[in-house]
Amino acid sequence: MVDAPESASVADVLAAVKKRARWVSQHVAAAKARLAHVLPREYVSGESLHYLGRRYRLKVIVAAGATAEARMRGAFIAVSVPEHGDAATIRGALDAWYRQRARELFAVRLAAVAAPLRWVKQLPPTRLQFMTVQWGSCSPSGRITLNPLLVKTPRECIDYVLLHELCHLLHHNHSPKFYQALNRHMPNWQAVKEKLDNMAEEVFRT
């Protein structure tokens, strides 16, 4: 689906789509290049983790018969595992914990961010999906997809991504009108986006 002025010719629309495709391809390639040198996690005690922009340490607790699960304990995110707790089991427990935290927090923040937006008559359907280079997206039908890993970032970064996707309900493009809406409701969005971009390598590290 492509949004374009009625006066635009087919040739102009096709040219704009091709130009946009190159932009997307270049940014995805750049994101992958940034992540290429980041060492993968080993999922062992002492590793650094993030939640809401703060740094925590992973603490692996091995206990016979334990159910693999993660919980926050002070400055640690502790993961309980059975005697044979391999990296995949620990990562699975952390992913489940991040997803649950994201589900709860995003619902609250989405309602708060959407409240002053006159074009949002009711909250759009949302879903969570782990992604490697995206924070979120908005489909042509108006469904918003959010990356649970976003919950690792500060609240203002979460609000920025939510606002960005909500603005797409009004303008499903990155036109000047889209950025006018973004500027009106978050004047400092560029600084927040820069902070988010600078965290991407660590947040997406797996």
Image (spheres, rainbow, N blue to C red):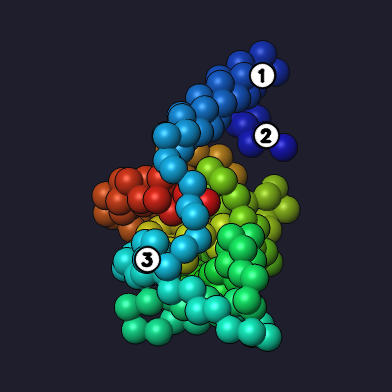
Q: Which residue is mark 1?
A: 14
Q: Quadrant of residue 86?
A: bottom right
Near mark 3 (Cα within 10 A), the count class, few <14, some 14-19 or many ≥20, is: few
> Please, what secondary structure does the residue beneath circle 2 have?
loop
For image coordinates 35% across by 70% down, the residue present is 56
Residue 35 location (% of width, % of height): 45, 38
Q: Is residue 33 visible?
A: yes
Q: Which residue is mark 3?
A: 46
Q: What residue type is disc 3 on?
A: Gly
Q: Which residue occupies the foreground of this view, 194 or 6?
A: 194
Mark 1–mark 2 CB contact (< 8 Å): no
Closer to the chain start, of discs 2 and 3, is 2
Q: Nearer the viewer, mark 2 or mark 3?
A: 3
Q: What residue type is disc 1 on?
A: Leu
Q: What residue type is disc 2 on?
A: Val
Q: Which residue occupies the foreground of this view, 50 or 16?
A: 50
145 to 73, vertically: above or below: above
Using the numbered discs, state the Cα–Cα distance from disc 2 to disc 3 in whole angstroms: 48 Å
Q: Residue furthest top?
A: 11
Q: Nearer the viewer, mark 3 or mark 1?
A: 3
Q: For this view, does 140 lie left or right of residue 199?
A: right
Closer to the chain start, of discs 1 and 2, is 2
> Please, what secondary structure does the residue beneath circle 3 have?
loop
Q: Which residue is mark 2?
A: 2
Q: Is residue 170 visible?
A: no
